Image: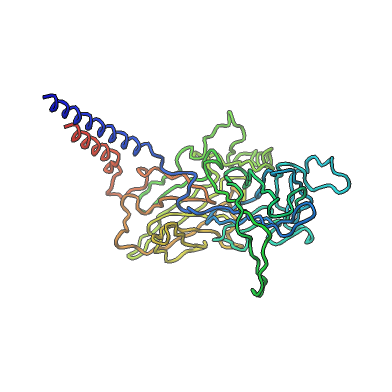
Amino acid sequence: MMAVGGGVGVGGSSRSVACCAVLLAVAVLFSAPATTEAYDSLDPNGNITIKWDIMQWTPDGYVAVVTMFNYQQFRHIQAPGWQLGWTWAKKEVIWSMVGAQTTEQGDCSKFKGNTPHCCKKDPTIVDLLPGTPYNMQIANCCKAGVINTFNQDPANAASSFQISVGLAGTTNKTVKVPKNFTLKAPGPGYTCGRAMIVRPTKFFTQDGRRATQALMTWNVTCTYSQFLAQKTPTCCVSLSSFYNDTIVNCPTCSCGCQNNGTRPGSCVNENSPYLQSAIDGPGKWTGQPLVQCTSHMCPIRIHWHVKLNYKEYWRVKITITNFNYRMNYTQWNLVVQHPNFDNITQLFSFNYKPLTPYGGRINDTAMFWGVKFYNDLLMQAGPLGNAQSELLLRKDSMAFTFDKGWAFPRRVYFNGDNCVMPPPDAYPWLPNASPLTKQPLTLSLLVFWIVLATLLA
């Protein structure tokens, strides 16, 4: 009897453990975040790589060329440009720079005669402006800190400067790599790893017949997190269609809420008599956004309109509207994910490139950007502050439908930042469909209770 009783006890304990496991799994399922901000599945290998090449030794240090390569598919560094910083490992100083400058000189009072360019332990470097005299330039410098993506503008996807370092090691064994690298673009968002010594970079002559190499090279990799970059989103999405009169606006307070009581000057009405004085206010030179007062309070809104339906094709209109009175977006780009993007037939007034974040197996992500000298500049809020295009897509007979919101995008990015989408139950529905007929959460709960009842039986 005791053995039987013991067996029943073990069985009861097993059921309890199983029930707890099911409850834990369900809790994790329903509490898991929809996205991971620090990792972008549409650009899993995207980063900015800083390459530090020592080109020659000097009596008290070395001369190096530092280059930043933007390996991100759709995220660029826009005006007012990058700021690169680090902490010296010893007591190094910067004697001179070409193609960039430090923001502060620091205390150089101990030097007699020649004064270094910078004596700070933790210097901050900025790019020079276009139009810099030629004797102060090197290749890939002097773009005001703007770095474009390889997809959009490969000729301007890198930025370089030359630096002469003193009071440093003069051999591969005595030189010390800097630490605590930081990259602002222009604000926070990038996290940089440790400097890693790698195989020296090789440089080939124009005819390709001779190669030289750096004396020593180290790399620093910096990755982006939208969560670190800003506390609130920067864009939102609105939806409409030809088959439903409903216009689904951006969710309320997508990028913040109107609160001029505690944050005066956070927004301004487009017909306000004080509009120009607000634009020229204290935040003009710091880049502080001044957006038009809206329910969503986003600087950028992307509107997706399902426009027409043909026998074998369907047409979509995309409109990008700028609500920021203090920002002209140069070299802007838009990334959209939709399952029918493998059948884009024609595109009007935008450039287009497919992105294949899943190794080429699935082609459901597209990158769009403006045509040079036509609409590659998205003007500040106002009558000219928008860009539009239309897409013609061939229907996939196996998947195409207007039902269940299939015709609307899955994700939208503007300038690399994920935009806030309306909730799926708010999408425009077909006239003979109803969002109330779809209850995915109720179905999941029903399955949960069935499983729990089975385990407890």
Residue in the foreground of this view, choosing between 271 and 362 = 362
Residue in the foreground of this view, choosing between 337 and 344 = 337
Left or right: residue 96 compared with residue 384: right
Inspect this view and state whether residue 339 appears: yes
Residue in the foreground of this view, choosing between 444 and 136 = 136
Quarter-wise, where is residue 71 in the image? bottom right
Inspect this view and state whether residue 326 appears: no
Note whether 298 is above or below 353 in the view shown: above
Left or right: residue 181 compared with residue 45: right
Residue 21 placement (x, y as % from top left): 29, 35
Quarter-wise, where is residue 32 in the image? top left
Residue in the foreground of this view, choosing between 113 and 431 = 113
Q: Which residue occupies 17% across, 27% down?
A: 6
Left or right: residue 159 compared with residue 239: right
Split into 4 quadrants, where in the image is the C terminus? top left
Left or right: residue 349 compared with residue 115: left
Q: Which residue occupies 59% across, 62% down?
A: 154
Report the colour scheme: rainbow
Residue 271 placement (x, y as % from top left): 59, 41
Q: Which residue occupies 38% across, 57% down?
A: 339
**Residue lying at the far top of the rendered structure:** 2
Residue 351 placement (x, y as % from top left): 52, 62
Q: How many marks?
A: 0
**Residue lying at the far right of the rendered structure:** 113
Split into 4 quadrants, where in the image is the N terminus? top left
Residue 417 placement (x, y as % from top left): 52, 48
